[in-house]
Image (spheres, rainbow, N blue to C red):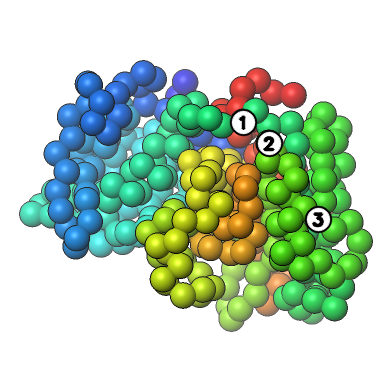
Amino acid sequence: MSLDLSHISRRRALRGLAAAGAGLVLAGREGVAFAGEEGALWTPVKYGGRDYLPLEQVGRFYGFGSVQRSGKGFVVGAGARSLSGQADSVDFKISHIKFILSYPVADVGGTLCLSRVDLVKLIEPVLRPSKIEGAARVNTVVLDPGHGGEDRGAVGRLGDEKTFTLDVAMRAAALLGRAGYKVLLTRASDEAVSLEERVKFARRFPAALFVSVHFNSGGSGTGVETYAMSPRGVPSMSAEGAQLAAYEAYPGNSFDSENAALATATHASLVSRSGMFDRGIKRARFYVLREANLPGVLLEAGFLSNPEDMQRIASPWYRQQVAGSIVEAVGNYRRSVGGASV
């Protein structure tokens, strides 16, 4: 299944992607061999001590077509079936959805190349989610409203993070329950819950999805971003933790592919419904992501430090849209990865 939405606006394209699987349906040729299996021809190159693969081969493998270059910029395919970005940059788009790669796209002797870890840990599960092996069929969602009690989280002129995250989680819980899912919350009131307690609670439900809800703060930042667990050996995109942690295997790394698929579904729906600036899908080793033994994401649904974002976040309508994006993402993930809908 594929979509051609190049003739309509970005907003409508995002809504189309969300409705059809949040970008996850942008699969190439089902059944094509991958990464060394019979039928796939790859010519890996070493660059900066890492394995890279020609972007031309990536585009051909997934049926996107050839690479078209303009200076440092490139595009493979068109519209809702496209890959785009720039050489020497980690900013990368699949259709209209922004991803932050683990390593920059490299120009190796005039040939644009993508790191093998980004191909295996990001591109493949996003474009072919149905091929994720061992993914559990999901009927349960654990919602994690950030902060609580004395921990107010980010504080804005019209309210604080702990209040807004709980409101979004309660709205999402109601919608998920009506859709037939079993829903659990790490907190259902204004109480302090440690990160360890949140993870311990989530671990009781391994055949579930974990969604941690947050709002951002800092400078003149604006927009929404979604985090998934960093694959082993990949630097974290947050300041949390020493980089030596990149070489350790955490429980969350058992679900690298599911995490990428869930983050894509979540972010596509969040960007579409919120209309906010797209800050991209990123990787980090936040405690709740690295220690959980189930697929999970952490979303940042706007900046309380930004006056315009704050006005939106303070609106019940906006928080309902964020809640709706979670529900839509869970359904799209389930259809794409875990089988039929509820």
Checking the image for residue 186, the label placed there is 3
Report which quarter residue 190 is drawn in: bottom right
* Residue pictured at 60% horizontal, 44% vertical: 295
**113 vs 9: above or below:** below
Residue under pointer 1: 136
Q: Amino acid at mark 2?
A: Ala
Is there a contact, CB below 8 Å, between mark 1 and mark 2?
yes
* Residue pictured at 37% horizontal, 59% vertical: 233
Q: Quadrant of the C terminus?
A: top right
Q: Earlier in the sequence, mark 1 or mark 2?
A: 1
Specify whether residue 292 is in view. yes
What is the crowding at mark 2: few (fewer than 14 residues within 10 Å), some, or many (at least 20)? some
Q: Is residue 67 left or right of residue 125?
A: left
* Residue pictured at 58% horizontal, 64% vertical: 286
Identify which residue, 293 or 43, lies in the foreground: 293
Residue under pointer 2: 207
Query: Which residue reaches farthest right?
Result: 189
**239 vs 188: above or below:** below
Q: Is residue 212 left or right of residue 14?
A: right
Is there a contact, CB below 8 Å, between mark 3 and mark 2?
no
Q: Is residue 58 left or right of residue 91?
A: left
* Cα separation between marks 3 and 1: 21 Å
Give the SS element for disc 2: loop
Identify which residue, 221 or 226, lies in the foreground: 226
Q: Amino acid at mark 3?
A: Thr
**51 vs 14: above or below:** below
* Cα separation between marks 3 and 2: 16 Å
